[in-house]
């Protein structure tokens, strides 16, 4: 009940007198209302965001000589004004292998010797 008394006893500010407030033209308010409506894009107009691909973290064993080749390829790309990371070089190699015909792909696989998997010894 005390809140009702506060609302009832409020005084109106002097500027609230309706005789002193100039009337706005109806055309300008209609233009601003139309501009506000046009400015808001519809939900159907929003572009659909592409989902990021899931990433997989993995580790593998590679001979030191071939690891050095990765570094050489990174330096080569940097000289061509396109610096890359090791993972980008590996992914480019995977794409290149995937594009090969079966016979050439098999030849490339046979050129790589099998190595013992697992962590290297601590010696």
Image: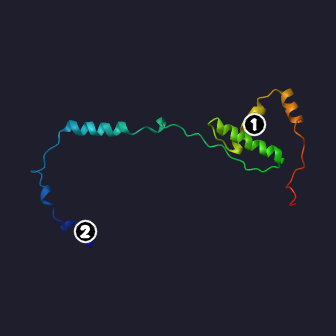
Image quadrant in which you'd find residue 121: bottom right
Q: Is residue 45 left or right of residue 36?
A: right
Q: Nearer the viewer, residue 2 or 123?
A: 123
Residue at 61% over, 42% down: 51
Tag 1–tag 2 contact (CB < 8 Å): no
In the rendering, which numbered label is found on residue 93? 1
Residue at 59% over, 39% down: 50
Q: Nearer the viewer, residue 82 or 57?
A: 82
In the rendering, which numbered label is found on residue 4? 2
Q: Nearer the viewer, residue 18 or 94?
A: 94
**Residue at the far front in the pictured view:** 79
Q: Position of residue 17 (x, y in %)?
A: 11, 55
Residue at 13% over, 56% down: 15
Q: Earlier in the sequence, mark 1 or mark 2?
A: 2
Q: Secondary structure at mark 1?
A: helix
Say above or below: 104 vs 85: above
Q: Nearer the viewer, residue 103 or 40?
A: 103
Image quadrant in which you'd find residue 103: top right
């Amino acid at each position: 009940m005390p809140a009702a008394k506060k609302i009832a006893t409020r005084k109106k500010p002097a500027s609230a007198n309706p005789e002193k407030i100039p009337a706005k033209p109806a055309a300008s308010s209609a233009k601003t209302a139309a501009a506000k409506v046009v400015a808001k894009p519809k939900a159907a107009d929003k572009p659909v965001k592409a989902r990021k691909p899931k990433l997989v973290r993995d580790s593998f064993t590679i001979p030191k000589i071939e690891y050095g080749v990765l570094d050489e390829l990174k330096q080569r790309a940097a000289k061509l004004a396109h610096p890359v990371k090791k993972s980008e070089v590996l992914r480019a190699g995977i794409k290149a292998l995937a594009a090969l015909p079966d016979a050439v792909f098999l030849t490339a696989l046979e050129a790589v010797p099998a190595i013992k998997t697992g962590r290297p010894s601590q010696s």
